[in-house]
Image: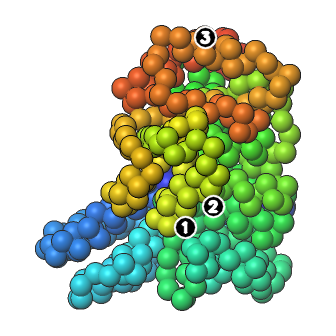
Amino acid sequence: MKILKFGGTSVGSAQRMREVAKLIDLPEQPRIVVLSAMSGTTNTLVGIARLLYDGDQTAATSRIEIMRQDYHMIARELFADEALATVAIKKLDGIFRAIFDLMRQPLSASGERVILAQGELLSTYLFHQYLTSVLQYDAVLLPALDFMRIDQDDEPDTAYIQEHLTAQLTQHESKKLFVTQGYICRNAQGFIDNLKRGGSDYSASLIGAAVDATEIQIWTDIDGLHNNDPRIVQDTYPLRELSFDEAAELAYFGAKILHPSSVLPARLHGIPVRLLNTMQPEAPGTLISSKTGNEAIKAVAAKDGITAINVKSSRMLLAHGFLRNLFEIFERYRTSIDMITTSEVAVSLTIDDTTRLPQILDELRRFGTVEVDEQQTIICLVGNLVQAHHGAAQRAFEALKDIPLRMISYGGSPNNISILVHTSDKVQTLQALNRGLFRPHAFTSSPKGESELVG
């Protein structure tokens, strides 16, 4: 079985849905199609929830009504037959009623999650209805809320997912084409929840692991993962192959074409992931597997919104337990550390979540002097950085000789060199690395999508 996930731009209009239907065709091999909400829908739903939190029901009602009318237009375009369009519009109105019903009382966090879930319910209903009523495909709509669940720690409950998805598929043993929602799930209490923004990739990977898929395909609006950010750097090119570890590093440090968590389930089960372009389906895209190539540095990505924290203390000298105490502060406040460097008297580290920064700084000041640098960017260099490629770091740092570097992390992973620069130096850094590391390449850049790019 194959898993095919299509992002928001891939199903962003009636015409795009028709094109996606051509891509899945009538399969000989069973496949599950995982859909995101149509592009712009989740952002609109977030805006509606924000208005409801602010108590502005008039503006929220207006926004919902505009969105409802937009979906009516999409339905009429997708279904040329008036009777089919009428059926579709009636179903869509039922979904919008669920949003209107939540306006009768103050919005809660659980209510907000229900609102955000409607985007995937809308897109999958329209697409499945088009497959079955227009193209006459024998397709089954699998409700993700019946099998996708997270546990009390907000982590996927993989045993539950496998058991309940298998049970649903068993009910349709003769079927070969299934459609389901990405992103949405239920939590440990049984309430509607989600896998956070970009979670449709994660859904696809979790589903692939649950059914032991032969391949997971992530269809977006760009031809695979590029070696640099094509919005900033000229002459980038798509990478044809990456290892799971390399892809995970790039996804975490800024490659928005891929959700940071989505590689792990596939890696654990040895399932290859292929990144493909719905706008250019003939392009080979990027294959992610256990295979590692010989290129010392394959790609560069950038992660903005970083805050650097420096803790300096003479008490640190030869003091065992110092780092443990330091890390426990971040653990208590559920704040992840991206980079860390140490000396005899100081520790520098970075975080990307400043929600609890004031409390963290108060506790850190018990250890010594604390300095904070905001507006930082992590530049991540990814490849096969084994010792045999001893010249890779030299080439990178030679390219960066004119750029002030705040931190460097090298050696913690055979796939990653991380460099911290001020965000104002980001563009210059990416361009300098492109000149210094990547020779002119045989591949040409594919059309640049607006929402799913490296960087």
Q: CA distance from mark 3 to mark 2?
A: 37 Å
- The residue where tag 2 is placed is 202
202 with respect to 62 (left or right): right
Q: Nearer the viewer, residue 386 or 116?
A: 386
Picture layout, residue 246 above or below residue 421:
below
Residue in view at x 58 percent, y 75 percent: 153
Q: Quadrant of the N terminus?
A: bottom right
Picture layout, residue 186 above or below residue 155:
below
- The residue where tag 1 is placed is 195
Mark 3 or mark 2: which comes first in sequence? 2
Please state the horizontal and vertical placement of residue 30, each as a whole percent of the image.
Answer: 81, 66
Amino acid residing under circle 2:
Tyr
238 with respect to 79 (left or right): right
Please state the horizontal and vertical placement of residue 60, each as a whole percent of the image.
Answer: 21, 71
- Judged from the image, the secondary structure of the residue bearing numbered disc 1 is loop
Q: Quadrant of residue 113?
A: bottom left
- The residue where tag 3 is placed is 398
Q: CA distance from mark 1 to mark 3?
A: 41 Å
